[in-house]
Image (cartoon, rainbow, N blue to C red):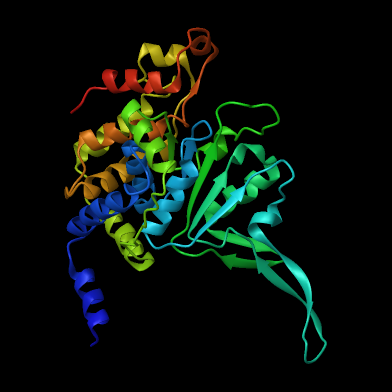
Amino acid sequence: MTDGQAQETSAQEQDPIDVLAGVRLEILEQVGRVIVGQDRVIEDLLVGLFAKGHCLFIGVPGLGKTLLVQTVARAVALDFSRVQFTPDLMPSDITGTDILDSDPETGERCYRFVPGPIFTNVLLSDEINRAPPKTQSALLQAMQERQVTAGGGTYDLPDPFFVLATQNPIEQEGTYPLPEAQLDRFLLSVHVGYPEHDEEKQIVEETTSAYAPEVQPVVSAEQILRLQHAIREVPVADHVLDYAVRLARSSRPDDPLAPEFVRRWVAWGAGPRASQTLVLTAKTRALLYGRPVPSIEDVQAMARPALRHRIITSFAAEAEEITGDQVIESLLDAVPEP
């Protein structure tokens, strides 16, 4: 057995809790060389990656969303592609298409599939709401099925496959907002905010100097796949499972568990996929912090990114300037812990 094979075997025998907690610290160290602050955003991104889900990032331009995704992709040794979504972007521009080709030896002509940029490990879909619905649907279908169908053929996407889509909350003219049914396909919705004063000062200092940090890969695609599988095997206590389900059900206005403010502020609540997301991301967060099983605290920590894009506020909420995040905050206060 070679040294490389021995190291690979040793890594497979390690406790996934220790491995994932160590990987988290190593990734944070590498990402911290380039990205200043945004700790919660990075945590949500890592949860999405190891939970095998896709993330939607919402933030104004210039906050480093693209740089963050590129940096994390380098730290986890994954292939990375970026697509700038525009109103004239066609589905084949991202999925690929068949072209007519000829054999140089026989001269025989045949169709050959040319893969699009979606055939990668990490795909950054920049400003996804600027593409027409047909293109959005093609991407979201590939995200769900992890396959692309073109010219009568079906092609599997690489594994792992992770989509990070961004949306600009301003300049909505000429955009095509994602329907709620499509938003639900994203595991998490992550809000990227402005940095603190000291963080912004450090950002300006580093980006206006000759500082050129290098990011080293700390985990391979094979290791990520093993950790994703290990997370699915993590047990969940019944009281944690029950709390996650009650939290999601309480967001539905017609549910007996719904508080009065939900009946007033919410038009449509989170569906069963929200309960699944709360439990899966709680498992992932627990292992990322070196704990063998998730707790109520993990469910609460993931409630905002897991629910904010799955709760549709009512006209009454809009009139009172109540946001989805405020509804979630009230839910966390209203739903009793076991």
Task: Answer yes or no: is residue 52 visible.
Answer: no
Query: Could you say which is closer to the camera, residue 262 or residue 320?
Result: 320
Q: In the figure, is residue 84 to the left or right of 74?
A: right
Residue at (41, 31) in percent of width and height: 307
- Quadrant housing the N terminus: bottom left
Query: Could you say which is closer to the camera, residue 271 or residue 47?
Result: 47
Task: Answer yes or no: is residue 188 visible.
Answer: yes
- Name which quarter of the figure residue 333 lies in: top left
Q: In the figure, is residue 9 to the left or right of 215?
A: left
Q: In the figure, is residue 224 to the left or right of 183?
A: left
Q: Position of residue 52 (x, y in %)?
A: 40, 53
- Name which quarter of the figure residue 113 lies in: bottom right
Residue at (33, 58) in percent of width and height: 228
- Quadrant housing the C terminus: top left
Q: Relative to 232, is 209 above or below?
A: above
Q: Relative to 233, is 12 above or below?
A: below
Q: Position of residue 152 (x, y in %)?
A: 71, 66
Q: Position of residue 98 (x, y in %)?
A: 73, 67
